Amino acid sequence: MEQIKKIKQVLKHQHRDELVQIGIRAIEHALRLKPDQATTQVIQQRLSDLRNNDTSAAAEIIREHDETRNRVAHRLASPVPYTKENVLLSATVELFRLATTEKYASGYMLDAIFVKCWDAGIFVGRDDTELHDEMNWQEKELRPLVQQAFESLWTAEDQLREQKRAA
C-alpha cells in the first residue's frame, strides 16, 4: 500500500512537471511580443531556473507578488500598471505556483498562464490581432500537449489501480 502511495506521488509530480514545461513554452512564445530588455532578462532567468527544476526563489517571488496584490486590494499601495511586461512577469509567478504545488495540477493552473500570455498581445499594434494570434498558437501547439499530459496521467493511474486489484 505504501508503495502505491509513492508511485502516485511520482505520477503527480511527473504530470505537474509536464505542465510546467508547457507553461514555459507559452511564456517563451509570448516573448516574441518584445517586452523591455530588463523584463525579458528576468523572465528568461526564471524560465531557465524552472527548466533546471530550480524553484528555490519561488517562495519569495510568489510571496512578493501576493503581498503587492494584497496591498493594492486594501488600498495601501497604488495598482501595478497593466503592461505587457507586468502581465508576462505575472505569468511567471503563476508558473512558479504550478511548479511548486503539491496538489494535483489542474488545467486551470495552466490557463492562468495562457491567459496572461494572451493579454500581453493587447499591447502590440492597434487592435487585438496579437492576442488572437497567441490564442490560436496555444490552441494549435499547446492544447494537444495538455490533453496528452492528462491522458498519460489517467492511463498510468488506471494501470496502478489494476495492479492494486491484482495484488
Image (spheres, grey):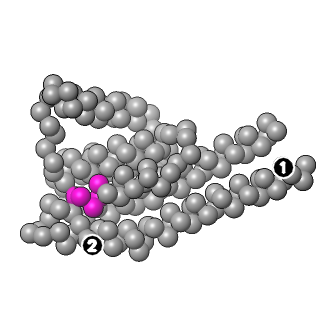
Residue at far front of view? 74
**Image position of 149 with respect to 13: above or below:** below
Q: Quadrant of residue 69?
A: top left
Residue 29 placement: quadrant: bottom left
SS at circle 2: helix
Q: Residue furthest right?
A: 167
**Residue 53 image point, x, y percent:** 50, 44
Q: Nearer the viewer, mark 2 or mark 1?
A: 1
Q: Is residue 89 left or right of residue 62?
A: left
Q: Amino acid at mark 2?
A: Asp
Q: Secondary structure at mark 1?
A: helix
Stretch in magenta: 116-120
Secondary structure predominantly adopted by residues drawn in magenta: helix
For residue 145, above or below residue 100: below
| Residues at marks 2 and 1, CA–CA distance in whole angstroms | 46 Å
x and y percentages locating residue 64 in the rendered image: 29, 30
Q: Which residue is mark 1?
A: 164
* Residue placed under numbered mark 2 in the picture: 133
